[in-house]
Image (spheres, grey):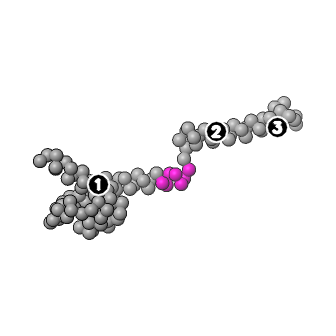
Amino acid sequence: MKLPAPLQGESRTRLLQGIALGAVATVTVGFIWGGWVTSERVRIMRAAAESSGRMSVLVPLCVAQFTAADGAIARFKTTSVYSKESLVSEVVKNVASTSMDYALATACVSAIDLELAKTATKS
C-alpha cells in the first residue's frame, strides 16, 4: 500500500512536527488566554466560593448575636484592634451551629465596625 505524499519522507517529518507544535500552541494559548485551569486551581476556586458563600450567611448572624449580648458593644469599642477577634470569639461561640474560627471572627469584626460607623453617622 502506497502512502500519500504528505506522509512520505521529509514531508512526513514536517507534518508530525507541525502536529506537535500545533498541540503545544493550543495548550499554551488555552491556559494563558482561554481560561483553562488545572484541577488544583479548580479546588482552590471552589473552596474560596464556598467560604465566601458561608461568610455571606454567617456574618450577619454573628453581628446580630454580638450586638444582642449585654455590654458587648461597649467592650468592643474599648478593645484594641488586635484583640477584637478574640473578643468576638469569646462573646459569640457558635453561629448557626458553626463554631467560630479566625476567618469568621475577622469578617464579623469588620462587619461590626461597619455597623458602628453607620450608627455613628446617623446620630
In the current view of this chain or complex, which residue is farthest to the top?
5
Left or right: residue 28 compared with residue 88: right
Residue type at numbered disc 3: Thr
The x and y percentages for residue 81 are 29, 60
Checking the image for residue 27, the label placed there is: none
Residue located 62% across and 41% down the image: 28
User: Which residue is tagged 3?
Assistant: 13
Spatial CA distance of label 1 from label 3 is 63 Å
The x and y percentages for residue 50 are 39, 55
Left or right: residue 98 compared with residue 66: right
User: Which residue is tagged 1?
Assistant: 110
What segment carries the magenta color? 38-44
Label 1 or label 3, whichever lies nearer to me, is 1
Q: Secondary structure at mark 1?
A: helix
Bin the neighbour count of mark 2 within 10 Å (Cα to Cα): few under 14, some 14-19, many 20 and up: few
Spatial CA distance of label 1 from label 2 is 45 Å
